[in-house]
Amino acid sequence: MNPLSSLYGLGVRTRNALYDLGITPAHRLRGPVVSIGNLSVGGAGKTPFVLLLGELLKARGIKFDILSRGYGRKTKGVALVDPAGSAGDFGDEPLLLARRLGISVIVGEERYQAGVIAEKKFGPQLHLLDDGFQHRSLARDFDIVLITPEDIRDRLLPAGRLREPLTSLQRADAVVLASAASKDGVPLEGKLVWRARRGIVTGNVVDRPVVFCGIARPRNFVLQLRTAGIEPVAEAFYRDHHAYSEQDIRDLLNLRQRSEANGFVTTEKDAINLGGFLSALEPLAVVPVKMDLSDAANAVDTMIARIAERRRPA
């Protein structure tokens, strides 16, 4: 193993032990907290899963909000996401969640403080903690962790992309096997095991497009397009959460001309990061990501029942 990964792993284990033993305290909100997280750096499908779970909760009439770090924003402190705002103000993923779900999303470096503000404004309703598995300073009532096939084969940072080893799944309540991830090699004893399938909606994509995106695993997006029968003629990839510039737009337009493409295709997150440049790339197809959860009704029933049991007065 890479010696730096060994050192990183020691730090992770030490930090978790301090929380497990109660030496480092976790702050608790009045309302229940459901964390959606993963083990790796990006690309596990957390945002699509939050969207899915949010739709399932809305269908049941359960009031909730979302607490997010607001990664990539240029602002500081706690803020209520304005759906008409920009990625620079709130972060691309919180903005996407607010627009798609039509519910309150609160961003803040410390999610506990974000939750306190949320409860002052909306009361102690259910909180979905986005990308929360490693954010242990906020106590949670139910932990959901997504696992992909890449996670099972991966190594700890900096040699790989894992923020925590697979053994950290002992803290999870439900493990979501996403993208056809196998159970083999995953410690699942005593865990709820859910299966989720991730896909895209490609109804308005032109033939022979240029595909571009700034996401964690861009090749997966290209594969999804090809599976849907769309064959890009050119590709342009940027770092995750990339904020597009005028030079990027010129480069993309030149790429379209050189490749004789008929238009562009990108992700919802990239559309948010394009901001005012969106119209400059027409015709541009913005492809939504969708996620389906096997036996979703039973999964939500089980989650709600466990939360109620854990919050029942002794």
Image (spheres, helix red, strand yellow):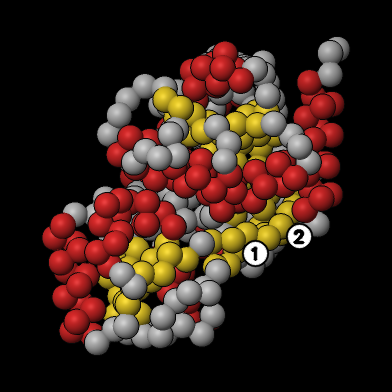
Relative depth, front residue between 241 and 138 = 241
Q: Residue at x 22, y 70 (%)?
A: 252
Q: Position of residue 72 (x, y in %)?
A: 33, 40
Q: Quadrant of residue 178?
A: bottom right
The tag earlier along the polypeptide, 1 or 2, is: 1
Q: Position of residue 87 (x, y in %)?
A: 34, 42
Residue annotated with mark 2? 294
Q: Position of residue 98 (x, y in %)?
A: 51, 41
Q: Badges 1 and 2: C-beta atoms under 8 Å apart? A: yes
**233, above or below 190, in the image:** below
Residue type beneath disc 2? Ser
Relative depth, front residue between 162 and 78 = 78
Numbered badge on residue 137:
none
Q: CA distance from mark 1 to mark 2?
A: 8 Å
Relative depth, front residue between 210 and 198 = 210
Residue 14 can be seen in this image: no
**29, above or below 267, in the image:** above
Q: Position of residue 312 (x, y in %)?
A: 84, 19
Q: Residue at x 56, y 53 (%)?
A: 48
Q: Residues within 10 Å of mark 1 (few under 14, many from 20)?
A: some
In this rendering, would 303 be left or right of 99? right
Q: Residue at x 39, y 66 (%)?
A: 266
Residue annotated with mark 1? 197
**195, above or below 61, in the image:** below
At mark 2, the secondary structure is loop
Tell me the quadrant of the picture where the C terminus can be found: top right
Q: Residue at x 83, y 42 (%)?
A: 301
Residue type beneath disc 1? Arg
